[in-house]
Amino acid sequence: MDHPIHEIDWRAGRVPVSRRFDDPFFSLEDGLAETRHVFLSGNDLPARFGPGFHIAELGFGTGLNLVAAALAWEAEGIDGPLRFTSFEAFPLSGADARAALAAFPEAAPLAQAIAAALEGDGRIETDKLLVRIVFGDARDTLPAWEGTADAWFLDGFAPARNPELWEPALMQAVARHTAPGGTCATYSAAGAVRAALAEAGFEVTRLPGYGRKRHMVRGRLA
């Protein structure tokens, strides 16, 4: 991997916290439950799944969102692979991702593949998954991407700490790479995030958040 290692500390012995952004990678309460609430339910998944479905993501992190999506896809028994593209500027080491995912027994079947992808070319290819982690600043890599997503997981660190992943221009790039009727979801309900998504063309709805977070946001491309 030709990228600097994203240095972390551990909170409660199992939750990785970014030193760069001083923010945890997932909920201190239950990261997998949070992912399912925000990113799956927020995008009406798995109900919208169908052959060729494509999820894109800002911020790969530990790979926990991929785990949740892959488990849901497999449970639905849909023919062919789920496509999953994630944009990540500061990837974790494979060892740290594996250690973080060890807190979730359901992640065990994918943990080694995720670690190898982070250490290697960013790809996982099986009969059920076609994953590509695009390394680099999403403000550069997303506009150059030729793909289109049916659903977006907007999972950068908190907007106050990681404003680069919430800039209006990047939200406009997200919209340009969203299929008609496509959706996005994020744990953040910050006013600036809602405004940027609305300006990009999404119909924005504020929903109950997970755990201690009062609200989250979903968007549907108008």
Image: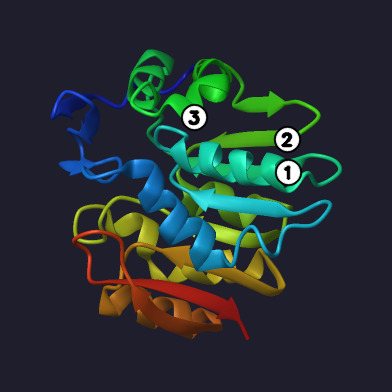
Q: Amino acid at mark 2?
A: Leu
**Badge 3 or badge 1: first in the primary sequence:** 1
Crowd tier of the residue under label 1, counting other residues whose Cα lies within 10 Å: few below 14, some 14–19, many 20 or above = many
Q: CA distance from mark 2 to mark 3?
A: 19 Å
The answer to whether 168 appears left or right of 149 in the picture is left
Q: Which quadrant of the structure image shows residue 143?
A: bottom right
Quadrant including the C terminus = bottom right
| Disc on res. 130 | 2
Q: Say above or below: 105 vs 168.
A: above
Q: Which residue is mark 3?
A: 106
Q: Which quadrant of the structure image shows residue 26?
A: top left
Q: Which quadrant of the structure image shows residue 190?
A: bottom left
Residue 77: x, y in percent?
78, 44
Q: Which residue is mark 1?
A: 82
Discs 2/3, front: 3
Check whether the beta carbons of the residues at disc 1 and disc 2 lie within 8 A of each other.
yes
**Badge 1 or badge 2: first in the primary sequence:** 1
Q: CA distance from mark 3 to mark 1?
A: 18 Å
